[in-house]
Image: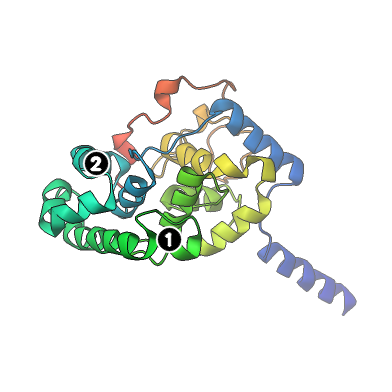
Amino acid sequence: MQTRQKSNGAARSRRHARTAYNKAELEEIFRRFSIQRPEPKGELEHVNPFTLVVAVALSAQATDVGVNRATRKLFQIADTPEKMLALGEDGVIEHIKTIGLYRNKAKNVIALCRMLIDEFGSEVPKTREELMRLPGVGRKTANVVMSMAFGIPTLAVDTHVFRIANRIKLAPGTTPDAVEENLLRVIPKDYLLHAHHWLILHGRYTCKARKPECETCVIADLCRYPAKTNDIPAVLEELPAQMIGASSLADESE
């Protein structure tokens, strides 16, 4: 009986394990990411916290490349809530109609502008709770804005981060919130500020959805992905600046 109880307890522990890596391995994973991309950047173009909020909200169910194409001219003429509000829904639609769900997104952008003006003095708030009050802004968008605009360590779980966390057993979870919670527990604190972008870029350009490029992976020897095709890590070196933010349209359709 005692043996069975111990066995059941071990099974429960495995089921609830937050990561397949020990502390030293986690440190090494993010150390390598930090060498490969010392200053990772988000790939949504913006000029200030306001345009960042709008860009991230528009990126739901759309690619960064597509959003950037739509917002370049928009942000040139409307980089404040007041200017965007003056365009009205129809004016916003004219700029973003190549983006999926553009009508509803335009409606949210205008409502977001009104709230920023009426309740926040036209300034983008810094707390998650306040950001999530804005129309069209969910937890992921709030986390991205907190990290990119204000340098607050957060973890925004998009499709890339969710896939990586589960595929390589870094921080398994059945929902984005569960993955976020697990990642915050396992990522070494010294690396937390940039972890969001490291994981996104790793998922976008190396550990791709359709076919992971394991031969170019700097953590191939540490990776716990059962179907990985390579155990030898790629040469660890800083990527050229132009590769950070390079457009990879082939894998952007997920």
**What's the residue at 25%, 62% (across, down)?**
108
Left or right: 95 as drawn, with respect to 167? left
Tell me, yes or no, if residue 114 can be seen here. Answer: yes
Mark 1 lies on residue: 131
Q: Position of residue 211 (x, y in %)?
A: 41, 39
Quarter occupied by the N terminus:
bottom right
The count of marks equals 2
Label 1's element?
A: helix
Mark 2 lies on residue: 75
Q: The residue under label 1 is which amino acid type?
A: Leu
Tell me, yes or no, if residue 173 can be seen here. Answer: no
Left or right: 86 as drawn, with respect to 22? left
Depth check: 209 or 71 in front?
71
Q: Are marks 2 and 1 in contact (CB under 8 Å)?
A: no
The mark found on residue 213 in the picture is none
Q: Position of residue 153 (x, y in %)?
A: 58, 48
**What's the residue at 44%, 22% (across, down)?**
241
Q: Residue furthest right?
A: 2
Q: CA distance from mark 2 to mark 1?
A: 20 Å
Depth check: 141 or 232 in front?
141
Q: Is residue 33 above or below residue 125?
A: above
Q: The residue under label 2 is which amino acid type?
A: Phe
In terms of sequence position, does the residue under pointer 2 or pointer 1 come before the other?
2
Q: Is residue 213 above or below residue 200?
A: above
